[in-house]
Image (tube, coloured by chain):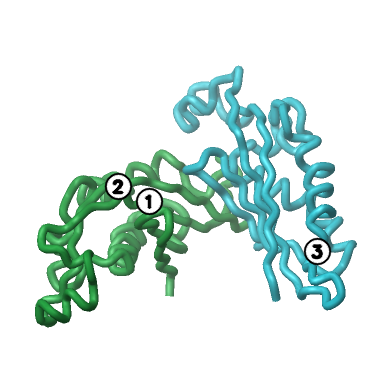
Amino acid sequence: MKAYFGRRYMLSASHRLHADRFTPEQNRQAYGKCNNPHGHGHNYVVEVLVSGPVDPEKGMVIDLADLDGIFAAQVMERFDHRSLNLDPAFAGQVPTTENLCQVVFGLLEDCLPAGRLESVRIEETENNFFESYRQ
Amino acid sequence: MVFLTRRAVFSASHYYWNEAWSAEKNHQVFGKCANRNGHGHNYTLEVTVAGETDPVTGFVVDLKWIRDLMEREVLAAFDHRHLNLEVEEFKAGKLIPTTENIAVVAWNRLGPAIAKAGGARLSKVRVYETPEIFAEYRGEA
């Protein structure tokens, strides 16, 4: 029987939206205050959804402690209280939350001991969020 | 096709225990969730139905009807109860009352009445154990 298990985490990080190939005017036009030179930060809420059969012995799709451990090692240690722009994952792409979703998806999808990563949803603020689904 | 979701809250206690395992293994696998006196949560139950909007009423289903169904089939049995001791599906040797299994059991309790009523179909049941932990069942095998 297939079910879904979801878990929400919070990480705090800074970023600046800036495309190297744009002129300063184009950057300002495209990104507005998100292009301010010294960046700014968010409390990102990352929601991870895992699907799979419910293990009959444990009653679980994935053990919460395992998922927490993987998320900590793969995502929190790397991004929490850091500047996203300085991470190699964003060397060639702007650290928008769309791109962060895809990066987080890639960091988690092959590391789960059970189940399958279905989606990563990131809430940048209470009023905007982004989702990346398995293609 | 429109999806309509009704939310309700219930408070219940539970613990995780597999009768086929030793006490030691239960504590090792389930950690503090295996404490035999149990612990509790404020759960949020979200029930989503899918269907076409009725041209006369403008409803997919009557929200009041869904609310009453959730109350009768799930909340009356789960709210302010000890799931392991008082809910048939979770009694010793049966299902462990994990969030996943609570979603499955709620689906099984709600599904027949929704199917019998015709019109909308049950699309998903999501259960939040805390604001950060949830499980969902969509009726998939």
Indicate the quadrant where residue B21 lies. top right
Query: Is B46 in front, or is A4?
Result: B46
> At label 1, which amino acid type do we have?
Val
Image vertical order of residue B67 relative to residue A104, above or below: above
Query: Is A49 in front, or is A47?
Result: A47
**Crowd class of label 3 (few under 14; some 14 to 19; many from 20; radius 10 Å):** many
Residue A11 marker: 2
Residue B121 marker: none
Look at the numbered discs 1 and 3 and tell me whether their residues touch, using CB distance below 8 Å.
Answer: no
Query: Which residue is denoted by mark 1 in the rendering?
Result: A45
Mark 1 vs 2, N-terminal side? 2
Q: Residue furthest top?
A: B37
Chain of the residue where label 3 is placed in the rendered structure:
B
Which residue is at 31% across, 48% downward?
Answer: A43
Indicate the quadrant where residue B47 lies. bottom right
Question: Cα distance, mark 1 to mark 3?
Answer: 33 Å
Which residue is at 54% across, 45% downward?
Answer: A60
Q: Secondary structure at mark 3?
A: loop
Q: Chain A's colour?
A: green
Residue A97: horizontal and vertical position, in percent?
Answer: 31, 64
Question: Cα distance, mark 1 to mark 2?
Answer: 6 Å
> At label 2, which amino acid type do we have?
Leu
